[in-house]
């Protein structure tokens, strides 16, 4: 049975912990420039329907350094769902490659791709979620804190794909997760209900960022208008007034909190230069760890880890 990684919940809690341990091991091998080539003579097709810096670079570099070759297929190369049906391209690409990584608009498309592909499929972001990002984020938190105990994460901003992956992680690991968003911008109600039903984590939705961040170990934000929503950017700037993560909001945690952002950031909008450049900010550790966490995910779903 081939494995896919489309949601964090595709892994058990044990597999998530194993992935973090593997990420730490592979990161050390990379830092030591060890000759480590588990993907020698393997290829990975990377299908992008949306733009990317981190996802493309971290997957391509990571796979190359593990001995493989990654192919970048941009929005105009495949035109998924337009030039060709998802179920056709999934079967074609799987005939040439050992693994597929896809960044698509529609989550249904990535599900369909995994259904028809005979090789593992990794979700590199859809409108619904971004599982590789949140695996890298949690790995980064583990590096900084050394443990996950009593962890409060306050997410301030849009209840978007990033939040859905945090909620999925909260179905597997115990977290106190608060999402502070304007009314009307809450995360998906089904995902929220499933997370609460899982009964493992404390989940809150708030419309008051100042209260939400009190006692938070991590303050996390993301753009107010995601890819595909940029025409709403101006309207969202109005609706999200008061939700900017600035020095004042960071001080409202009342403790030495860390600041995280998946990037790309719109400086001066959802957060400020001052916060991104502050000692509390771990955004570049987070970006680097995309590569190490994804390498571990690749090894696990390809039966090498
Ligand atoms: N965080 C993230 O996925 O960045 P890119 O959109 O640049 O890949
Ligand atoms: N929510 C953002 C995340 C980018 C990594 C988007 O979907 O554009």
Image (cartoon, rainbow, N blue to C red):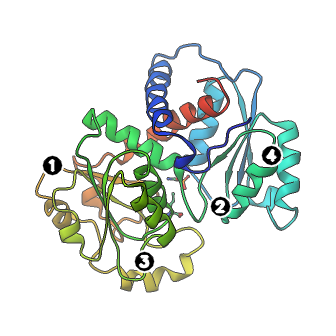
Please indicate whether residue 270 sits to the left or right of residue 172 in the image. left
The residue that label 2 is drawn on is 50
Q: Which mark is residue 185?
A: 3
Q: Who's the residue at 48% across and 55% down the image? A: 165
Q: Quadrant of the N terminus?
A: top right
Q: Quadrant of residue 146?
A: top left
Q: Which mark is residue 207?
A: none
- The image position of residue 290, as x and y in percent, is 49, 41
Q: Who's the residue at 82% across and 59% down the image? A: 86
CA gap, disc 2 and disc 1: 36 Å
CA gap, disc 4 and disc 2: 21 Å
The residue that label 4 is drawn on is 117
Q: Earlier in the sequence, mark 2 or mark 1?
A: 2
**Few, some or many C-alpha atoms within 10 Å of disc 2 (few <14, some 14-19, many ≥20)?**
some
CA gap, disc 1 and disc 3: 28 Å
Q: Earlier in the sequence, mark 4 or mark 1?
A: 4
């Amino acid at each position: 049975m081939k494995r896919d990684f489309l949601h964090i919940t595709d892994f058990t809690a044990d597999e998530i912990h194993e992935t973090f341990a593997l990420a730490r091991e592979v990161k050390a091998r990379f830092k030591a420039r060890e000759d480590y080539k588990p993907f020698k003579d393997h290829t990975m097709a990377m299908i992008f329907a949306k733009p990317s810096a981190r996802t493309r670079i971290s997957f391509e570099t990571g796979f190359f350094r593990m001995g493989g070759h990654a192919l970048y297929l941009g929005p105009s190369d495949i035109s998924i769902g337009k030039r060709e049906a998802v179920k056709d391209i999934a079967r074609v690409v799987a005939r040439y490659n050992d693994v597929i990584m896809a960044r698509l608009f529609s989550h249904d498309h990535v599900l369909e791709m995994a259904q028809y592909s005979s090789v593992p499929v990794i979700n590199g972001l859809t409108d619904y979620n971004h599982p590789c990002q949140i695996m890298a984020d949690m790995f980064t938190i583990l590096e900084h804190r050394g443990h996950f105990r009593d962890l409060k994460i306050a997410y301030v901003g849009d209840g978007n794909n990033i939040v859905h992956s945090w909620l999925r992680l909260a179905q597997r690991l115990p977290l106190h997760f608060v999402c502070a968003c304007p009314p009307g911008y809450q995360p998906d109600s089904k995902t929220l209900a499933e997370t609460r039903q899982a009964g493992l984590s404390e989940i809150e939705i708030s419309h008051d960022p100042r209260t939400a961040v009190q006692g938070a170990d991590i303050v996390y934000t993301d753009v107010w208008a995601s890819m595909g929503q940029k025409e709403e950017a101006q309207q969202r700037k109005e609706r999200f007034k008061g939700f900017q993560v600035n020095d004042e909001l960071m001080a409202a945690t009342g403790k030495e909190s860390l600041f995280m952002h998946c990037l790309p950031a719109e400086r001066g909008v959802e957060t400020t230069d001052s916060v991104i450049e502050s000692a509390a900010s771990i955004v570049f550790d987070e970006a680097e760890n995309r590569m190490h966490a994804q390498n571990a995910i690749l090894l696990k779903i390809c039966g090498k880890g």
